[in-house]
Image (cartoon, rainbow, N blue to C red):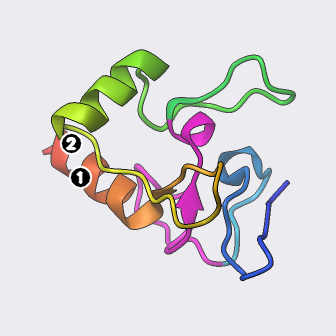
Amino acid sequence: MNSIRSNGTNIGALSTLPNKPDNCRDTGFNSHLPVTGYLRLSHIIGNPKAKPPIPAIIPVGKSTWWAGVKSGRYPQPVRTLGLRITAWRVEDIRALIQQTAG
C-alpha cells in the first residue's frame, strides 16, 4: 500500500506492489523502483517479517546501513517529510545501485 502525504510525496511500500507502478522505468536491476519519490528504510534493506515480505533492494542489516550512512558509503536520508519520517530519494538509491554494480 502506498503512503501519500498531504503534500503529495510518495513515501510508501513501493516494493510490495504486485505490479510495477506507472511511473517505473524498465531498467533491469531496479525496474520496480519509481522514477522519482522516496523509499523508507524497510523498503531498501527489506523486511522478511512483513505481510507480505518486503524483498531487499540493498541486502544489508539495519546497523550496517546506518553505519554506512554515517561513513558516507550510503546516501543521507531526507528528513523534511515530517518530524518522525526518514526516507531516501529514489534517485540516490538508483545511483548507489549503479555505483556498486559497476
Q: Which picture quadrant has residue 68?
A: top left
Above/below status of 82 relative to 36: above
Give how far across and how far down residue 9 sits, in percent. Answer: 66, 75
What is the magenta range? 23-44
Q: Is residue 60 left or right of residue 82?
A: left
Above/below status of 9 relative to 20: below
Q: Which mark is residue 101?
A: 2
Is residue 74 in view from this perspective?
yes
Q: Amino acid at mark 1?
A: Gln
Is residue 61 in view from this perspective?
no
Q: Amino acid at mark 2?
A: Ala
Disc 1 packing (10 Å; few <14; some 14–19; many ≥20):
few
Disc 2 packing (10 Å; few <14; some 14–19; many ≥20):
few
Considering the image in quadrants, where does the N terminus appear?
bottom right
Q: Is residue 20 left or right of residue 102?
A: right
The residue at the point 51 percent across, 39 percent down is 44
The residue at the point 73 percent across, 50 percent down is 13
Q: Is residue 38 left or right of residue 29?
A: right
- Which residue is label 1 attached to? 98
Decide which of 86, 4 is in the foreground and name it.
Answer: 86
The residue at the point 68 percent across, 68 percent down is 10
* 37 part of magenta stretch: yes
| Secondary structure of residue under mark 2 | helix
Above/below status of 21 relative to 101: below
Give how far across and how far down residue 83 sits, in percent. Answer: 64, 55
The residue at the point 29 percent across, 37 percent down is 69
Give how far across and how far down residue 70 sits, in percent. Answer: 25, 34
Q: Are marks 1 and 2 in contact (CB under 8 Å)?
A: yes
Q: Is residue 39 left or right of residue 22?
A: left
Badge count: 2
| Secondary structure of residue under mark 1 | helix
Single out the residue that lies furthest toward the left. 102
